[in-house]
Amino acid sequence: QVQLVESGGGLVQTGGSLRLSCVASVRTFSIYAMGWFRQAPGKEREFVATISWSGGSTNYADSVKGRFTISRDNAKNTVYLQMNSLKPEDTAVYYCAARRTYTIAVVSTEYDYWGQGTQVTVSS
């Protein structure tokens, strides 16, 4: 069983930055591809970013490309989401997810484990 715990959410003004962290309680974190998803009120959960086991492959939603950066530190069992130039439409609960394979995925059903989420609110 893998437990994922997100942190780093909060309230920020438009144009500001936040860095989300997700720590995984698993012995072999390096074999998991990781992803970030988000869900705004009244909307479906949507893909944000994903990273392969080594960090060598990443993919981003068009809406966040050039503003968000996903990275990982396998020695710390942690994946990060650096969010810059935040917009009010980025307001959502952000979820970390783990996929029991090496390769990235953009579909939520491809992930096996989920964190509890962390709230990000961007004020205009």
Image (tube, rainbow, N blue to C red):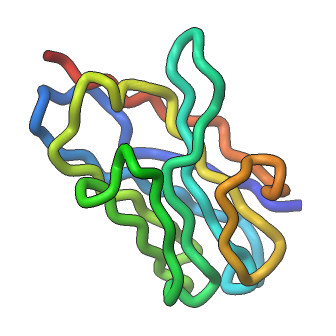
| Foreground residue among 27 and 69 | 69
**Relative image position of residue 79 (x, y in whole percent):** 50, 67
Figure label count: 0
- The image quarter in which residue 25 lies: bottom right
Q: Residue at x 33, y 57 (%)?
A: 65
Q: Which residue lies furthest to the top in this view?
A: 42
Could one spot residue 75 in this view of the protein?
Answer: no
Could one spot residue 39 in this view of the protein?
Answer: yes
Give the vertical position of 89 relative to 84 (above or below).
Answer: above
Quarter the N terminus occupies: bottom right
Quarter the C terminus occupies: top left
Give the vertical position of 104 relative to 62 (above or below).
Answer: below
For residue 90, side relative to residue 93 (left or right): left
| Foreground residue among 117 and 111 | 111
For residue 70, side relative to residue 30 (left or right): left
Give the vertical position of 60 relative to 92 (above or below).
Answer: below
| Foreground residue among 76 and 90 | 90
**Relative image position of residue 106 (x, y in whole percent):** 65, 57
**Relative image position of residue 71 (x, y in whole percent):** 42, 73
Q: Which residue is drawn at 73% across and 76% down?
A: 32
Q: Residue furthest front?
A: 62
Q: Residue at x 12, y 39 (%)?
A: 16
Q: Residue at x 72, y 62 (%)?
A: 98
**Relative image position of residue 103 (x, y in whole percent):** 71, 79
